[in-house]
Amino acid sequence: MNSNNPPSASGNSSSATDVADTPKIGFWRRSNLGQDVLLPLGVFILLLIVWEAAVQIFTIPVYLLPAPSVIWTDSIALAGPIGEHTLATLRTVVLGFIISIVISLPLAVFMTSSPVISSAIYPLLVLTQSIPKVALAPILVVILGANELPRLVITFLVAFFPLVIAIAIGLMSVPAELLELGRSFKASKFQELYRIRLPYAVPFIFSGLKVAIALAVVGAVVGEFVNADKGLGYLIITATAFFKTPVAFGALILLSIMGIVLFQVVVIIERIFFPWSAASQETAIA
Amino acid sequence: MIEIDRLSKVFRSRDGADVVALEDISLTIDDNKFITIVGPSGCGKSTLLRLASGLIRPTSGSVTIDRAVVEEPRQDTGIVFQMPVLLPWATILDNVLFPLKMMHREEADSTEQARHLLGMVGLGGFEGKYPRELSGGMQQRAAICRALIHDPNILLMDEPFGALDALTREEMALEILRIWTNQPKTILFVTHSITEAVLLADRVVVMSARPGRIAEIIDVDLPRPRTFEIEAHHEFQQSAQRIRELIFGNRRG
Ligand SMILES: Nc1ncnc2c1ncn2[C@@H]1O[C@H](COP(=O)(O)OP(=O)(O)OP(=O)(O)O)[C@@H](O)[C@H]1O
Ligand SMILES: [Mg+2]
């Protein structure tokens, strides 16, 4: 609602003198808060109002398209159970994501250790990606049993591929000068990996992690669609089956929020533990 | 003592043709001498340094340091590349300590040693900064500290000031002379600048290209310590003139 208020450019900017010198340009360039947060928020709120109004004016039935206010009240009424479903999905996403990391990292190291191994494994990896995961899920349930395992495997299968590729590219794109530097100090193969290749790959690893965490949410929901007694994916299936569309919408919104929050967690971990990595990406974009 | 004996290096390029980078180079360098190497681009200066460092192996001939044939990088050799080649994820201090970490030679006073070196090249107070926060000249100075941290007897420098502006370059040349005076060591220094070559050297190795050979070795007997004022000295002028003749004369002919 306060999106019309001028964002305090001089307030959030560290160099107020620049802003004073070139007020117009300074405003456009520096109003990050206004442009990055308030503007999209304003548009979003406007959209909600239009949605609410459209549902009221055209009297759209609630099982087809519930108004935002109805989604809110229906979801709040089920806050307890929905919270449990959210935690269940979160658990699958996080565990699946961790499994992806634990498998991708050594796999990428192994793959990049020699061209022969790389050309032996790479086609297999591509094969795992060409299998439609939704089709694979019910088969996995039969093989692995109706428990958490098939959900984790699906999450892993959806999330790990971009991660392996990102790490492998990072490990391979170390400049020859850095490797030569290591050799000039008699670096062993392990030292080269641990002290040169892996640190160099960190920005690549994090861009892979950002893709992987978003995909892990998708994977977890696919797993829950097929076999689950808990979770937001399960909730969407059961809610729509009983035409409780507002609750399904509520679950959908929670999934989106979960995706955004987890993504930001990865971003923050990078900023805190690998500030040079985050900085190198920012300068690359700028 | 470094003995380079009938050293040759042939590279096989991708299309199968052979490139003779160095042919029949022989050179003996006494301990604690400052040797500069000049020559046209592509005459094999970098190749010569890489052979001396043990990073690559010769096609024939040998490099011998203190009676041991060089077959791989040695712990008593420090290298400064044309580019600083610092680790972007490590602070300046950690970059300087990097060789000791790799060679498992870190000791209690290593950090103090690194700080001392950084102070010596005017980088005191920058220990905790990351390479990208430093200018090119400062990065190269840090790289020089890294090459000195394990107190090598031999310092190989491949156009270390190539990427620097003229002013910084002159400053750094004097810096290197100061370091060399304080901690005597054998230095092989590749440069494109004839002035730099004469200013720094006890002996200037002038090379010619295709195939890379030694055209002449010029002894420089100018008094030390030297500054750029020595440029006016007539022996300096003579040596510089001779080098110019060797390099540009060959080109015309
Ligand atoms: N790894 C390599 N593979 C193939 N050819 C090479 C390789 N390294 C050097 N050469 C060739 O060897 C010759 C000498 O190269 P080198 O880099 O030693 O020259 P340089 O004197 O250092 O030149 P510059 O002054 O331009 O640095 C060149 O013709 C170059 O093409
Ligand atoms: Mg060179």
Image (spheres, coloured by chain):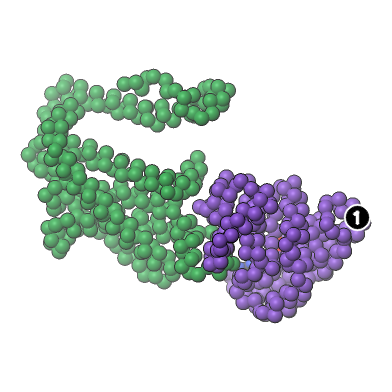
Chain colours: A green, B purple
| Residue sitting farthest toward the left | A242
Instruction: Write down the chain letter for disc 1.
Output: B
In the rendered image, is residue B85 in sight? no
Q: Is residue A130 above or below residue A63?
A: below
Residue B14 in picture, x, y percent from top left: 57, 69
**Is residue A4 in view?**
yes
The answer to whether B29 is drawn above or below residue A218 in the figure is below
Q: Check the picture and name the quadrant holding the N terminus of chain A.
A: top left
Q: Nearer the viewer, residue B179 or B203?
A: B179
Left or right: residue B52 compared with residue A218: right
Using the image as rendered, state which of residue B92 and residue A58 is in the foreground.
Answer: B92
Q: Residue at x 92, y 56 (%)?
A: B234
| Quarter assignment of residue B248 | bottom right
Q: Nearer the viewer, residue B95 or B20?
A: B95
Residue drawn at 75 percent across, 46 percent down: B167
Secondary structure found at label 1: loop
In the image, residue A139 lies at what x, y percent? 15, 60
Q: Residue at x 76, y 56 (%)?
A: B178
Residue furthest to the front = B108
Task: Give the residue type that dot 1 points to.
Answer: His
**Whether residue B11 is situated above or below residue B98 in the rendered picture:** below
Q: How many marks?
A: 1
Query: Is B147 on the left-hand or right-hand side of B197?
Result: left
Please rate how many residues cluster around mark 1, counting C-alpha atoms within 10 Å: few if below 14, some from 14 to 19, many from 20: few
Instruction: Tell me which corner region of the image, top left, top right, bottom left or bottom right, holds residue A121.
Output: bottom left
Q: Residue A67: horizontal and vertical position, in percent?
A: 17, 27
Q: Which residue is mark 1?
A: B233
- The residue depicted at 17 percent of the width and 40 percent of the height is A83
